[in-house]
Amino acid sequence: MRLLSYLQNGEERYGSATGDGVIDLTSRMGGEYPNLKALIAADALSIAQQAVAGQVPDYRFDQLALLPPVTNPEKLWCIGVNYNDRNEEYKDNSDLPKYPSLFVRAPSSVVGSAQPLEKPRVSDEFDYEGELVIVIGKAGRHIPREQAWSHIFGMTLCNEGSVRDWLRHGKFNVTQGKNFDRSGSIGPWIVTADECDPRGPHDIVTRVNGEVRQHDSTERLMFPFDFIVSYLATFATLKPGDMIATGTPTGAGARFNPPRWLKPGDVVEVESTRIGVLRNTVVAEEPLA
């Protein structure tokens, strides 16, 4: 099942993507599950599947503004330096990491598929990072690695947009450069684990204006999904709707010589065969009034 959130006539709703349209679930679930996060938390996927069986789309995609699939996650985790060869890009002769790099993003820093990405006016070093995202379905703390898969509800995609010069403002953190409003995107939908097994393997491709910049597979992850879930749950309770961006492959714009920064008008696509395509166009941040 492909589940997504969207705006229709200014109202936030959620539904199931099928063909060229969306079957609305907000109206069919009787108000018991007001948003997708509530449906996930209630373990109500089978009810949603019954609600859409035999139905035709209520809306075309061009009638909707897509939102990140879970619009109100408690936590949006991001894993850094997770594909083989990524550590070498830093050219610091460091050993491979023993533990994952980790930071968080605010929900206000991401938009949905087909919504504009904002290049900040304070920087010309706006970059892309295509990533696979796992969505937590079942809460847990101290989750053994062998049980981690049962806590994953499904998968989606992320362009973990980064403002590179602002990543270096702090001595020990990258938070500033990862949290500019509307600098990243998540979507277009969550593909549930019963249809897209998180165990994979899964490919990940990033294109800028049709040119492939990143291409890799989860077979080359240094920290696989089950390890990440277990590791995070060691210190934090994972909650339904939490999203974990699992790292980007080599080939971000900063790694070219000279760097290839995003500019207004660029189209960034992040794709995985069994999930779909997350597509966004870059726009300039509006000037101060």
Image: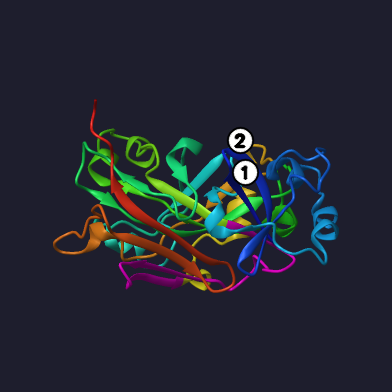
Q: Vertically, is 220 above or below 255?
A: below
Is residue 199 in the magenta section?
yes
Left or right: 212 in relation to 241: left
- Circle number at residue 276: none
Q: Check residue 10 for magenta coloring.
A: no
Per the rendered image, the range of residues in magenta is 189-216
On screen, 277 above or below 243? Answer: below
Q: In which quarter of the image is the C terminus?
A: top left
Residue closest to the far top: 289
What residue is pinned by disc 2? 74
Q: Is residue 99 visible?
A: no
Q: In which quarter of the image is residue 49?
A: bottom right
Q: Position of residue 71 (x, y in %)?
A: 58, 41
Contact? badges 1 and 2 (CB < 8 Å): yes
**Residue under the point 56% across and 51% down:** 64
Residue at the far left: name it.
Answer: 258
The local secondary structure at tag 1 comes to loop
Q: Position of residue 6 (x, y in %)?
A: 59, 47
Q: Is disc 2 placed on a helix, strand or loop? A: loop
Crowding at label 2, few (<14), some or many (≥20) Cα neighbours within 10 Å? some
Q: Inspect the image, locate mark 1, and give the three-letter code of the amino acid beneath it.
A: Asp
| Residue density around tag 1, few if under 14, some if 14–19, many if 20 or more, within 10 Å | many
Tally of numbered tags: 2
Q: In this view, does 220 lie above or below 128?
A: below
Q: Quadrant of residue 103?
A: top left
- Relative image position of residue 243 (x, y in whole percent): 58, 47
Residue at the (26%, 46%) spot, across then down? 164
Q: Where is mark 1, residue-wise? A: 242
Q: Is residue 47 visible?
A: yes
Q: Name the side, left or right, on which 82 lies relative to 121.
A: right
